[in-house]
Amino acid sequence: MKYLKLPLYIKTALYCSLATTTFSALAEELNFDMGILTSRGISPNVAQYFSRAPRFLPGSHTVMVKINGVNRGSLVARFDTEGQLCVDDDFLSASGLVPLNISAKETCHSLQEDYPSAIITPLPNSESLELFVPAQALDNNLLSLNNVIKGGTAGLFNYNLYASRSESSGSDSRNYAQANLEAGLNFAEWTLRSRYMLTNNDGEYRTDS
């Protein structure tokens, strides 16, 4: 399936063809001059799509998600051809909502099918999405220890280097260099760290650990 992408000239034409704007508490309705759009080779369907409330273009978008006023971070959200949010269990789990065992065969599952009182507000201008859902939709076990992944093996190496050279008239130059090193290993539930500081002050070396 090919999704609609708007080049800059189309967005400009839409803006220029805007005739009247009516604001309401629930939606924003826009009327475009179809003659201007047609003269620029733009399908009237584009204007029809944007004539209703703000919404995302069809496809997947990376958005900042807020649930009941709480930021849930940056997630990938999918929208259908009408700009409706399509949820799956991966999105629900990542956003802190109770998974609904949604079938993979569903092309677009609406959250409002399960929670009719849910309010979904797409904010494409800020690449964000706000949801207000009932309490039973929230996953209270999200921070449970059962959801914490433990163990694994990892290594790390951090360093911080600094060097300076100072010179003044009638005196020798001075050189100074310092290196802060940290090596570490995570194994199972063990954490090992070793830190070193190496300094060179005009040829005098020193090591601290």
Image: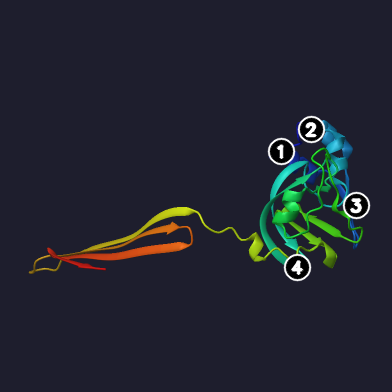
Tell me, yes or no, whether the two marked residues, 2 and 3, touch with CB atoms within 8 Å.
no
Q: Nearer the viewer, mark 1 or mark 3?
A: 3
Q: Which residue is mark 3?
A: 113
| Quarter where residue 164 is shown | bottom left
Say which quadrant the N terminus sits in: top right
Q: Position of residue 53 (x, y in %)?
A: 86, 52
Q: Which residue is mark 1?
A: 9
Residue 133 in view? no
Q: Which mark is residue 40?
A: 2
- Amino acid bearing label 2: Arg
Q: Nearer the viewer, residue 4 or 6?
A: 4
Residue 8's image quarter? top right
Percent coordinates x, y for residue 185 in the rendering:
40, 58
Q: Residue at x 43, y 63 (%)?
A: 191
Q: CA distance from mark 2 to mark 3?
A: 40 Å
Q: Give the residue number, with chain letter if any, for mark 4.
A: 69
**Mark in the foreground, 2 or 3:** 3
Circles 1 and 3 in contact, beta carbons < 8 Å: no
In the image, residue 175 lies at what x, y percent?
17, 64
Residue at 82% in and 31% down: 39
Query: N-terminal of the two: label 3 or label 4?
Result: 4
Local secondary structure at mark 1: helix
Q: In the figure, is residue 147 to the left or right of 81?
A: left
Q: CA distance from mark 3 to mark 4?
A: 22 Å
**Is the residue under label 1 in contact with that under label 2 (CB below 8 Å)?**
yes
Q: Residue 101 versus residue 6: which sits nearer the camera?
A: 101
